[in-house]
Image (cartoon, rainbow, N blue to C red):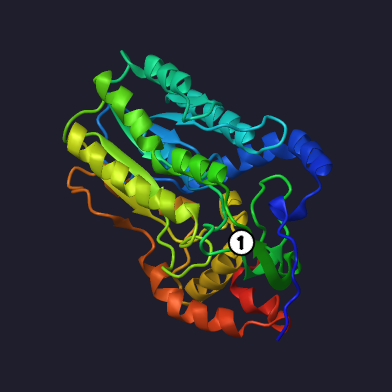
Amino acid sequence: MTLEVFKKLPLGGVDRRAMVGALAERGPTVAREQLAAEQKSVTKSGAELAPDAAVIILGGSNGITRGLAVQLLFGDRASVYCVHLDSEKMQIGPHHVKAIGEAAAAEGLTARFFNADATKAETIAEVIGEIKGKHRAVHLVNGIAAGATKRYQEHGPTQVKEVDVAFDTVLQTPDFSKAENVRKLGLVEVEVATDVDIERTNKFMGTSSLLWAEPLAEAGLLAKGESVVAFCDYDYPKDDPVYAMGPLAGAKQLQRKTMAEIKERFGVKTARLCYPAVATTALGAIPGGLLMYALTGQILAERGQLRGIPELARESMAIFEKRYDGADVRLDAAYQETLPEFFKRRDALTPGDIPGAFAKLYG
């Protein structure tokens, strides 16, 4: 069987001019409505955050870390400081931030946002300056996802099976709500990473936690035995042609070494939050990522195990329970169990199976 090779376009090929107009017109309303729906079901978790502690969240204005901010604020009444760099015109993030900030202020909660590069020293200093004197201790959750979705030179370029999916113009996430949004199955190119790609990926996803831990400790905000330094992780298949053979894997491995150093030097709890593939903006940029989500999501839905971001965010709060001992938080156990079936279905999948192969995701 020969599959069509197609170009994987950012945000599924959404027209940028139309997107800017849609964001300006509908962004505020969509963000407020999504938050209002989430607030109806959010409840307190088993977390035990001290009232004089705060949580810093790095990266991800439109996925897991946004879900964590909502849970922390409206479920567990924690003080939250978020740092990520978004375009006011081109991204939904600033609208989410405004909606969350307004709702938090209405309930007397502390929610601060810094639209800045989380790896820059001046950004880190600004955030610490804002927190010091207001909070005794800090927890840090690193969800930065700014890496090169390419391969190392020794592996060379390749092609991977992928589905072409329409994105929601305002929310900027792959839209599996309708069967017609799954447009075709084909192959997409995976390029070779440059030295600049590798260096940038290592900086953002490999060592960025340490960039924050050192000055936080110096400021006296990392409480030994209490503060948690966590990062949002994804356990990719070991032979994955993109994740396992390029800068993403290298950065993940570097991040794990960095976390061990942070634990050793500062006496804090370190956490690895292991998530399944989720239909986020970031996943949509990874070659093969949408097919990975769609097929595993279909299998999980068939098994009654598919969970959305709010559920995953609530379960992530396990890192803030007093009994938490630093073990990996496996939010992806059911997902990992789907992989044998995923590979079987992926290899057998043909263009004629689209869009019916993902029927459980629609509607």
The residue lying toward the viewer, choosing from 25 and 41, is 25
Left or right of residue 328: residue 59: right
Q: Examine the rendered structure and indicate whether residue 362 appears above or below residue 58.
A: below
| Amino acid type, residue under disc 1 in the picture | Pro
- Whether residue 187 appears in this view of the structure is yes
Residue at the spot of label 1: 287
Q: Please give the name of the residue rendered at 36% of the width and 18% of the height, measured from the top-left corner.
A: 131
**Percent coordinates x, y for residue 147 in the rendering:** 53, 47
Which image quadrant for residue 96? Answer: top right
Count of labels in the image: 1
* In the rendered image, the vertical position of residue 308 relative to residue 339, given as above or below: above
Question: Where residue 179 appears, x then y in whole percent?
Answer: 72, 70
| Quarter of the figure with the N terminus | bottom right
Between residue 76 and residue 267, name the one nearer to us.
Answer: 267
Residue at horizontal 24%, vertical 30%? 50
| Quarter of image, res 3 | bottom right
**In screen coordinates, is 247 left or right of 136?**
right
